[in-house]
Amino acid sequence: MNPGKPAAADWRRQQERSNLAILKLMVWISLTFGRAIGRLVLHGIAAYFVLFSPKARRCSRDYLHRALGRWAEWSDGYRHVFSFASTIHDRIYLLNDRFDLFDIELVGEAAVSAAARSQPGVLLIGAHLGSFEALRAVGRGQGGLPVAMLMYEENARKINATLEAINPAASQDIIPLGRMDSMLQARDKLEAGYAVGMLADRSLGDDATIPCDFLGQPAPFPVGPWRMAALLRRPVFFMTGLYLGGNRYRLHFEPLADFSQTPRADRDAAIRAAMQRYADRLSHFCRQAPYNWFNFFDFWQKK
């Protein structure tokens, strides 16, 4: 396997527009007056971003054109941003264990449970597609597998700070990426019977990538999550928590790979095959729920 040059990590360079005071006001409105009133505010937020974020709007249109198979209208861009805002808003309630507000359907969870019974821990690899918090909420509140998340702490740090102020326990199952002991922490969680989740559709600027076919054109995907998965030698499942509108979510789990029996000599080929399977399933769900993929930057790196 010959990884390409590191991705430009355009998403990290984009100026963070979130404002801590506004987020805290949003939290207060939502918890004081309820989800329905809070969602009314989201329409104004979505309209603001569609009107005043031209670069994100162009990148959203490029993606939606591929996922929808047609020209993306302004209304499509608005639905895209509103879906993103909705999943962020719902985190307020999910972090406060208000599961009664949501209709969450599970698809494929039996295979994950079976894998977890055969050896402790499974790996869940997803994308910035829908809501990962819905998955963690199911694990915490409905007797499922406890879930820990490997993530870049600096990403959306203001949002996380606000949500942690609502429920400090929310940050206890986050394993920070980019540290020397990140993989050791992940291994310990797996040995304790956790499902450990990673999102594999973004990279840091110094991550190696390889191109995978995604929505009809090669795009760079980071190799790091897959190298970690191969070293941890666990079954790997694709995961996504699709937002279906209103209060409805559908969580999907599909087997992607099992590195537990992969010989070292075959590891690179197994990683490459798993990455393309991942990109294929991501393409499938992007077409099925096109307004759920929340990467508002030049993912295909056409510049």
Image (cartoon, rainbow, N blue to C red):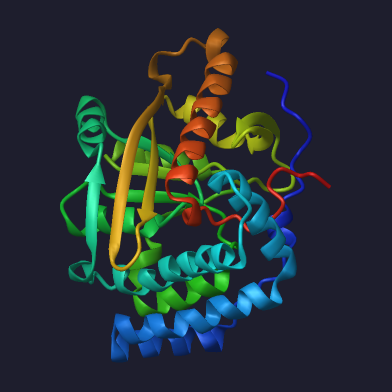
Residue 119 picture location, percent across and down: 26, 27
How many circles with numbers are drawn on the protein?
Answer: 0
Residue 131 appears in the picture as rendered: yes
In this rendered view, identify the residue nearer to me: 113 or 214: 214
Residue 223 appears in the picture as rendered: no
Quarter residue 33 falls in: bottom left
Q: Is residue 124 above or below residue 65?
A: above
Q: Is residue 192 above or below residue 115?
A: below
In this rendered view, identify the residue nearer to me: 96 or 191: 96
Which residue is pictured at 47% across the width and 78% down the height?
Answer: 162
Which residue is pictured at 61% across the width and 67% down the height?
Answer: 74
Q: Is residue 148 left or right of residue 139?
A: right
Which residue is pictured at 49% across the width and 39% down the height?
Answer: 282
Quarter residue 123 falls in: top left
In this rendered view, identify the residue nearer to me: 249 or 172: 249
Q: Residue furthest right?
A: 303
In this rendered view, identify the residue nearer to me: 66 or 163: 66
Q: Is residue 205 left or right of residue 176?
A: right
Residue 193 picture location, percent across and down: 27, 39
Residue 248 picture location, percent across and down: 28, 61
Q: Is residue 134 above or below residue 205?
A: below
Q: Quadrant of the N terminus?
A: top right
Residue 90 picture location, percent across and down: 36, 70
Q: Is residue 7 left or right of residue 18?
A: right
